[in-house]
Amino acid sequence: MKNWKELEASSFLDANARERALGMVEAGTFTEFLNPRDRFVSPHLPVLGTAVEFDDGTVTGVGLIGKHPVFIVSMEGKFIGGSIGEVNGGKMVNTLRLAEKAAVQIKAAHPDEYDARRPLVAISFETGGVRLHEANAGLLAHAEVMDAFQDCRHKVPIVAVVGSKVGCFGGMGFVAAATDVIVMSEEGRIGLTGPEVIEQEMGKEEFDASNKALVYRTTGGKQKYIMQDCNYLVEDKISDFYDVLAKVADLSMQQIEEMRRIGSLKLVQEQMDLVKLVGEMQPKDSMDLWKYYGNESPEALPEMSTAEFLKVVKRRVRK
Amino acid sequence: MALTTLEFEFKADAPKSIAKEWSHLGVTGSGDLEVLMERKDLGGKTKAKVVTPVVGFDAIWEKMINKFVVENNVGDVSIEINDDNATPIVVYMRLRQALAEANAKEGEQA
């Protein structure tokens, strides 16, 4: 395993779930919940003849950024596509519940210093959603995570970190949308139905999943940044994601609330306006929308480095 | 259909245990595997447990892990592997990496 300094300098895209978990908090502060030695494997997979993993494909734990305890959920896309089953779903839910419990206890113990010690949850999504081998338990986990988000609201900020190979799709696409803050790299992708599934169901005319440029400008970080679906766009480096987490940890809960996309009548109206706009415009490509928001040559945007892109890009203006 | 569990015991000529109490390496990805090594008093022997969806390769598993144990003089170690169709040479490479990780100094891990 790389040491912390090497981890920080390395690619987020190439890192496995445990490396990302270690790299998203300060050096040497990470404590894993249910580590591989606890052998908490899925009870359903062996019956179906599918290989198991000691951490069930999700690394959970807690570390520190300054005085903020940072609760981590980090998914491993190489293990059954990062899918969510009973055990790793339960790990995710209980990590969120622990974060909320910590917030209550810290507030009681340090009422004057709460803002400096407020917990943060960072979820590194790399998943296609429910694990079909144990789909009922997986779906239930999705619902319980949403519940836990609601319980954490106004108390503990929840940050979605998306920059891994599998992206964040299926039910977990909904879950990511329900977080407070979303951080992505250009390589990160968020969506509901994945590109291959759209092509399979609706045909190549509708969506050509082998056209990687199309896939990335529809689901990738740059598109999400322009549309205000993601709040921060960073380079593909673990330290860049770490820096955003450190920044968010120090924001006020009011500032964090303003970054949300769903969760109030006003935000629902904002989303409805977008649906109306797309209905009227009938865009053929996400580039039509980029142009609508004031980007004169939208075809140049995918080619730019993240730094260049951030300098010139025009985003949807939020009310 | 269910997963196969294989258990083996090996003995090297000059067995030496690992530096850390335990260590873990790898991901059970397609064509890959994860290794969990633990220091254990086994009278110099090495115990290995393999959980795999593959059927009919018991003898090759035994040969490959034996080669690893004998060539690297591993002893008093319990090895557990979760495999997902890794080829023998990948198995050998991951075991070597896991051993390096299990003997890495704390500072290197940080």
Image (cartoon, rainbow, N blue to C red):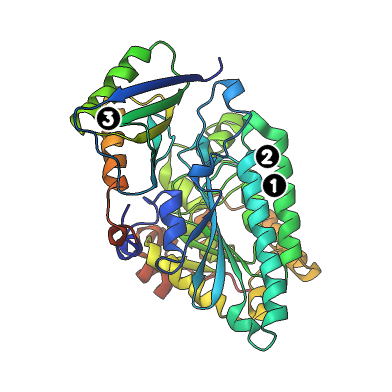
Nearer the observer: mark 3 or 1; the answer is 3
Circle 1: residue type: His
Q: Is residue A305 left or right of residue A51?
A: left
Residue A105 is at least partly visible in this image: yes
Q: Position of residue A245 (x, y in %)?
A: 50, 70
The chain that hosts pointer 3 is B
Q: Which residue is mark 3?
A: B92
Mark 2 element type: helix
Nearer the observer: mark 2 or 3; the answer is 3
Q: Which residue is mark 2?
A: A138
Circle 2: residue type: Gly
Residue A124 is at least partly visible in this image: no
Q: Which residue is mark 1?
A: A142
**Viewer-proximal residue among A315 and A221:** A221
Q: Position of residue A314 (x, y in %)?
A: 50, 72
Density class for disc 3 (Cα within 10 Å; few <14, some 14-19, many ≥20) is: some
Task: Give the alpha-carbon distance from disc 2 to disc 3, as whole Å.
Answer: 34 Å
Quarter of image, res B25:
top left
Q: Residue furthest front?
A: B43
Q: Position of residue A268 (x, y in %)?
A: 76, 64
**Viewer-proximal residue among A84 and A207:** A84
